[in-house]
Amino acid sequence: MSISELYRSLNPTSIRPDGVEGVRPSQIQDRLPAKTKNPSEPSEFEQILRHENKSFSLSQHAETRIKSREIPWDSHLEKRISKGIDQAESKGSREALILADDVAVIANVKSRIVVTAMERSQMKEKVFTNIDSAVLV
């Protein structure tokens, strides 16, 4: 048995009129994913992606600041910051100051990255630049 015969037995193909081998149309339909019943419903992948995107990440600078300034960081604070980013995003913000009790963070809203963080005691100048919104959570 030749290699081409072996290949054809494993991958059945049809030969077009121009002599080029291809996949049978029925095989293409078998390979397509099943259609959802309601096209307006998000697929499972889209649901997972949306869930994952609701969180945020910390820049290296923010991580360093949180550790060096000994900012109390917990899951409750993270949820509040995420909520603040969501609120800023809904208003079309790009860079936001998010204030949660005695903690202030600057976040890039589009990329959902916290750029820096500080506590009230580190807010000496009380001036924040290069932000377009402030969110109190």
Image (tube, rainbow, N blue to C red):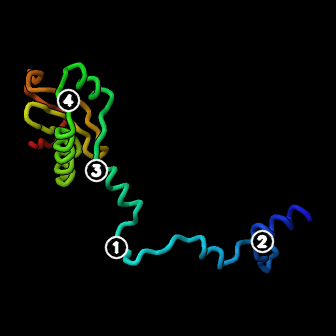
Q: Of the residues under marks 1 and 4, which one precedes in the sequence? A: 1
C-beta proximity under 8 Å, tags 1 and 3: no
Would you name the residue on which mark 2 appears?
21
The quadrant in which residue 56 appears is: top left
Q: Residue at x 20, y 29 (%)?
A: 117
Q: Of the residues under marks 4 and 3, which one precedes in the sequence? A: 3
Is 86 on the left or on the right of 60, as rendered?
A: left
Camera-nearest label, 1 or 2? 1
The quadrant in which residue 17 appears is: bottom right
The quadrant in which residue 22 appears is: bottom right
Would you name the residue on which mark 1 appears?
40
Q: Position of residue 8 (x, y in %)?
A: 80, 69
Q: Classify mark 1: helix, strand or loop.
A: loop
* Image quadrant where one finds the C terminus: top left
C-beta proximity under 8 Å, tags 2 and 4: no
Camera-nearest label, 2 or 3? 3
Q: Residue at x 34, y 73 (%)?
A: 40
Would you name the residue on which mark 3 appears?
54
Q: Amino acid at mark 1?
A: Ser
**Disc 4/disc 3 C-alpha distance (Å):** 19 Å
Say few, some or many: other residues with alpha carbon within 10 Å of mark 1 (under 14 / 14 to 19 / 20 or more). few
C-beta proximity under 8 Å, tags 1 and 4: no
Q: Of the residues under marks 1 and 2, which one precedes in the sequence? A: 2
